């Protein structure tokens, strides 16, 4: 009986964040007055749009580097690829593939730089990666605002500001919906984009396979204990850099998939929120800064966006103010990261207490 009680207690501690947001969603759904069909349609759309970005965070967590808020570097690389493809007038799936090819070396370079910086900030990777994203954002904006059209040729005048150089704030994509239109089928009135889903399945298979490779095992060992990994002959810093490079490249592809679904690029601010929302979704799924799975990413994306959909309307219907509902949605998106990190610290403390209690029981039993 004691064992069952401890197992239940551990399960509740491990699942505290998902349970909290399931409860919030259950309360908010009736208040929002949305129909079930509308919610299913929105969740399916957002799952296909955002899941790839969330999955790009898994490998750095496995390598012990926490949530990679520096994934915005990859998102910026993806946007640069899409801007060039739009300028060249390349459409549909071919345009997206070429955008990925163009942005991949940029993402690798940025990932290598990011990994080198994070190796000098061991133990403070998350806040460092967040600051790094802000730093590179300034360079990214300088590149698009001053170099494009002046030094770097841009043929399409619709992309340029009225002064003749610098990219406009918003760009309509010629590649809009290219992946989503592949194998699109309506199921019960809900359009399902199997083309994009297959891409998400591919990254899930890649992640599962990668964890079993030598490099994947090395990352796991580094994440568990860098000192032991170094003693075992694993090149700790190189392994950490490799995890960040892969994460950055995957984030680059994820941003391209996200933007082709949206159909437009918010040129200067489009990548800023990518890491925050992806991290929030992962944490809502029950992941922590030290452990994250594919299931955490998928469940978290669905649950986070369910709450993101219903909260503004629930707030409006409850208070009569649409602005208050929108404010509450932004509060939730930022607050979920804080709550998840606080609960993670609390969970670690509880785990230590439970382990000490179990140790005392084992000692008494052995006597």
Image: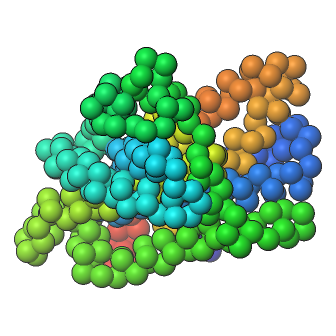
Quarter of the figure with the C terminus: bottom left
Displayed quadrant of residue 285: bottom right
Describe the colour scheme in one phrase. rainbow
Q: Which of 353 and 69 is in front in this view?
A: 69
x, y (%) of residue 85?
46, 50
Instruction: Classify 317 as above or below 354.
Output: above
Q: Which of 122 and 8 is in front in this view?
A: 122
Instruction: Classify 211 as above or below 16.
Output: below
x, y (%) of residue 302?
67, 56
Write the residue at 56% across / 64% down: 93
Instruction: Classify 365 as above or below 184.
Output: below
Q: Which of 233 and 10 is in front in this view?
A: 233
Instruction: Classify 144 as above or below 289.
Output: above
Write the residue at 89% across / 54% down: 36
Write the residue at 52% across / 64% down: 94
Horizontal side, residue 20 vs residue 284: left or right:
right
Q: Can residue 18 be seen in this view?
A: no
Horizontal side, residue 356 vs residue 203: left or right:
left
Write the residue at 79% across / 71% down: 185
């Amino acid at each position: 009986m004691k064992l069952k009680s401890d197992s239940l207690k551990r399960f509740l501690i491990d699942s505290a964040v998902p349970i909290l947001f399931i409860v919030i969603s259950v309360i908010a759904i009736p208040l929002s007055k949305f129909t079930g069909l509308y919610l299913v349609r929105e969740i399916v759309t957002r799952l296909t749009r955002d899941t790839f970005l969330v999955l790009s965070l898994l490998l750095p967590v496995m390598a012990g580097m926490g949530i990679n808020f520096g994934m915005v570097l990859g998102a910026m690389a993806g946007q640069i690829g899409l801007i060039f493809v739009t300028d060249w007038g390349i459409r549909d799936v071919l345009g997206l593939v070429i955008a990925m090819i163009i942005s991949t070396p940029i993402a690798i370079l940025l990932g290598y730089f990011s990994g080198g910086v994070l190796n000098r900030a061991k133990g403070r990777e998350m806040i460092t990666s967040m600051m790094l994203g802000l730093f590179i954002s300034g360079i990214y904006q300088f590149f698009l605002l001053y170099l494009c059209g002046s030094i770097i040729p841009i043929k399409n005048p619709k992309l340029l500001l009225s002064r003749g150089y610098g990219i406009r704030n918003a760009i309509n994509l010629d590649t809009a919906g290219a992946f989503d239109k592949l194998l699109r089928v309506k199921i019960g009135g809900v359009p399902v984009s199997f083309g994009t889903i297959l891409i998400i399945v591919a990254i899930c298979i890649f992640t599962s396979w990668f964890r079993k490779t030598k490099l994947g095992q090395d990352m796991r060992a580094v994440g568990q204990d860098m000192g032991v990994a170094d003693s075992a002959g694993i090149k700790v810093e190189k392994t950490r850099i490799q995890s960040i490079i892969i994460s950055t490249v995957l984030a680059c592809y994820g941003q391209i998939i996200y933007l082709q679904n949206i159909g437009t690029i918010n040129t200067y601010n489009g990548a800023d929120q990518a890491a925050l929302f992806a991290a929030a979704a992962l944490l809502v799924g029950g992941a922590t800064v030290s452990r994250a799975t594919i299931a955490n990413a998928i469940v978290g994306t669905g649950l986070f966006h369910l709450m993101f959909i219903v909260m503004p309307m629930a707030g409006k219907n409850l208070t009569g103010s649409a602005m208050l509902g929108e404010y509450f949605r932004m509060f939730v998106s930022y607050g979920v990261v804080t709550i998840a990190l606080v609960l993670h610290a609390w969970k670690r403390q509880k785990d230590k207490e439970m382990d000490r209690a179990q140790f005392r029981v084992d000692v008494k039993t052995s006597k």
